[in-house]
Amino acid sequence: MLTMKKALVSIMLLVLIPISIHAAKITFLTPSWGVPPDKALLESFQKESGITVEIQSVQNKDLFSRIQVAAATKQAAADVVFLTQEAPSNLVAVGMMRSLNDLMGKDPLESDLTGQKFWNIGGEQFGVPVYAQLVMMDYNTDRLKQAGYSSPPKTWNELKSMSKKIKSSGIDKHPIAMKSSDWSWYLMSLSMGDPMFDRI
């Protein structure tokens, strides 16, 4: 499913107070898994932009509390924060995040960013996707063959239509099945929209 739109995993958010577009240095607050793995890429960004990035890595469980403490003193925990889907309820709803509306129009690639609607609250954009991934999807070749398919789906639309056929043919009552405790199911849902699951 290499051509399939991939599910949104993580979000980069600007926090609390405006940062200068031409800032010489910014702080980037992130869980350990958000630290850029490619040092050469980070160095390239710093050289091209003239912006030095100070990375502050904390445990995920400490990230929200650090932002809340900073907000209580009217300070920004960092210029940029790497967060996941919990932020709208934990931070945006209580006024701890800065809107990106005045910055979004400056990005020539804005239309290529998938998953922005999730972070648009009341007409204000609070986040942009950093990267997306669908870690893995397994499929049952026997059931695909029973439905008349010789290969797995390559797009979300193919996945949807094939799943509907498998279900309507009585081959499998639940053509898309995951444990609700698996994080990947809601990432797929977010990337396609809940109707994919509600109607299949």
Image (tube, helix red, strand yellow):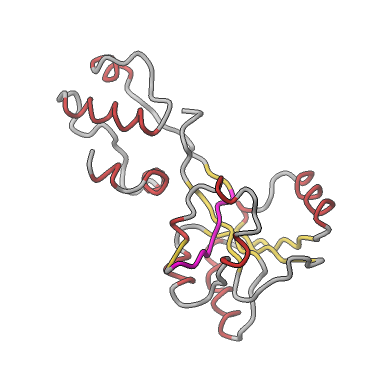
Of residues 127 and 137, the one nearer the viewer is: 127
In the image, is residue 63 above or below residue 11? Answer: below
Horizontal side of 51 relative to 116 (left or right) equals: right
> In x, y percent, where is residue 112?
56, 45
| Image label count | 0
Question: Which residue is depicted at the point 22% across and 25% down?
Answer: 166
Q: Quadrant of residue 99?
A: bottom right
Of residues 189 and 117, the one nearer the viewer is: 117
> In x, y percent, where is residue 182?
37, 45
Of residues 98 and 186, the one nearer the viewer is: 98
Taking the magenta stretch, the answer to whether it contains residue 125 is yes
In the image, is residue 47 above or below residue 89? Answer: above
Q: Furthest residue to the bottom?
A: 73
Q: Which residues are magenta?
A: 123-130
Question: Which residue is depicted at the point 18% across and 23% down?
Answer: 171
Taking the magenta stretch, the answer to whether it contains residue 182 is no
Horizontal side of 159 relative to 1 (left or right) equals: left
> In x, y percent, where is residue 50?
83, 58
Q: Quadrant of residue 15?
A: bottom right
Horizontal side of 187 relative to 162 (left or right) equals: right
In the image, is residue 83 above or below residue 72? Answer: above
| Quadrant in the picture for the C terminus | top left
> In x, y percent, where is residue 23?
78, 67
Question: Which residue is depicted at the point 39% across and 34% down?
Answer: 156
Dominant secondary-structure state across the stretch colored magenta: strand
